[in-house]
Each structure stands twice: as structure tokens, then as C-alpha cells.
Image (tube, rainbow, N blue to C red):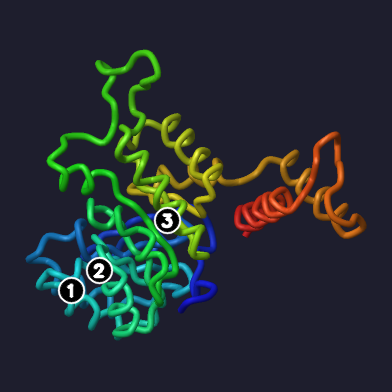
Amino acid sequence: MTGAPAWIPPGPALLFCPADRPERYGKAADRADVVIIDLEDAVAPAARPAAREALTASELDPDRTIVRVNPVDTDDHAADLEALAATGYRCVMLAKTESAAQVTDVHSATGAAVLALVETPLGVVRAEEIAAAPGCAGLMWGAEDLLAAMGGSTSRFAAAEAGGPRVAGEYRDVPRHARARVALAAAAFGRWAVDSVHLDIADEAGQRAEALDAVALGYVGTACIHPSQVAVVRGAYAPDDDEVAWARRVLDAAEHEKGVFQLDGRMVDGPVFRQAEATLRRAQAANS
């Protein structure tokens, strides 16, 4: 898979669901655009065999389902891939991806599109080669695992540290760098990118601000850890009526203009066309 990704999220809100809780699968699918059935962090090691059985017995829509498997250097990885192969699901999230070879191996073993979860220092510094790997459909990043691997304590500024340019709840510099690097690497190789989870479930304002920023950076979606976050994410990614009307005027005018032109006092060229197209794609996803 060196060209266009074989699988693309149909909407911006991707909701994690523990694989050992099959009674929640349908509920998660009803509430979110995409369900991420999680065989890794959300499941205790002793419960993973039963979780894999639940996965293989499930019948969710493959177009709206991702399966997160354990990292390649764990005892659970091969069993996870075997369980995935017994399903019709076509996208696999590889936890703690650290090389292009890992992505290619998982794609070759399963035939599934790979969402590479970059959440270690080595994964971040190799984001570009991971994005370029055959089989890679998209990239996601994770803040807390990244900081833990660095020996750090928290990815965000606390209220006591806020002041000046710092705002409580905002990412520290290293997570901000990782977030930007993943977005750049994905865009450079024609992959899509998913933003990390917002752990403070009650912080709707912070979740919305972060999702709006993700839209501005070109992310196609944001991962959620609680159903209540879905509506916030969807609202942030959905363009308002004025944005949609502007995008349509740009694309309509482009059909009759040659090269660069002015519209509503603004210069319109290739990058503006692409922004307009992205706005309409988000509008379509919001209305689907």
C-alpha cells in the first residue's frame, strides 16, 4: 500500500471499547463514527484470551471498526493477529509502533490497513519512515505512553504551573512536538492522522479546543475514551454553515476561473482549493 489508504475513517469520533466487554461493542458503534476494539491497555493480560474470542465472534461494520493489537514484542501480539484474521475487520491499530518493518509485517500477515500508533520516543523520531511504510494507512500518537517512556510524569501543564504563555491543561513542548511531527509525517506520505485522547472526561471546553486545533492541523479524527466525548469531537470537526457556503463558492468559482483569482476580497489558489475540499469532506462526514 504505497498510494491511497485502503481504509479511511468515515467520521471524526473514534471511541475505544475494551475487547473483553462485548456487551459494549454495539453501544459504542451506535454512539461513535468508529469503534476501536482494544485488545491492549483496556484489557488485563489474564482476560485477553477471552477478549480475542469475543472479537472473533463479533459482527460490527468493518467500515466503522478498528482493532488495536498489542505491540510486536509482546506475547499477545501473534495471538491478536490470529484473532483479527478470523474477522472481517480491515483496519488494525498497532500499539507502540517503532519501525516501518513492524507496519509492513502486520499488513502482510493480516492484509489489513495499519493505523500505526506512535507513542514511544523511538516511534516519534521514526514517524516519517513509519508513515512511508507499505501497509500504513494512517498515524495516531499517544501522549501518556510517550512521557512514561521518557521517565516523565505528565504530558500537560498543571494549574499551579500556568502563567504567562502556559495554560493549564495544555500539552508540554515534547508532546506538542510529537503531535505536530505525526501530522506532518502523515501528510507527507498521503496518510491520515488521528489525534490522541483527552483524558479529562469532564473537561468539555478543553476537549473542544483541542479538537478544533486538530482540525486546523489536518487531523481527520480524534480518539475518545468515553461516549460523552463523541458529541464534543463531532461538533468541533463539523464546519458551520458559513464555512460550508464559503467552500462551495470557492469550488464553484474555480470551475470558471483560470489560475489564481480573487473571491470576497481574498486571493484563491491551489492551497485554498484544498482547504475548501477538506471543509466539504468534514461537512459530509458530519451529515452521514
Q: Secondary structure at mark 3?
A: strand
Question: What is the C-alpha distance between the residues marked 3 and 1?
Answer: 22 Å
Task: From this view, report whether residue 9 is shown above or below residue 153.
Answer: below
Q: Which mark is residue 69?
A: 2
Rendered-image quadrant of the C terminus: bottom right
The nearer-to-camera label among 3 and 2 is 2
Precedes in sequence: disc 3 or disc 2? 3
Residue occupied by mark 3:
14
Precedes in sequence: disc 2 or disc 1? 2
**Residue at left offset 23%, top offset 47%:** 146
**Residue at left offset 49%, top offset 60%:** 192
Q: Is the residue marked by circle 1 packed among few (<14), some (14-19), or many (20+) residues within 10 Å?
A: some
Amino acid at the residue labelled 3? Leu
- Mark 2–mark 1 contact, CB under 8 Å? yes
Q: Secondary structure at mark 2?
A: strand
Can residue 22 be seen from the camera position used here?
A: no
Classify residue 138 as left or right of residue 20.
right
Give 95 or 263, whichever is nearer the viewer: 263
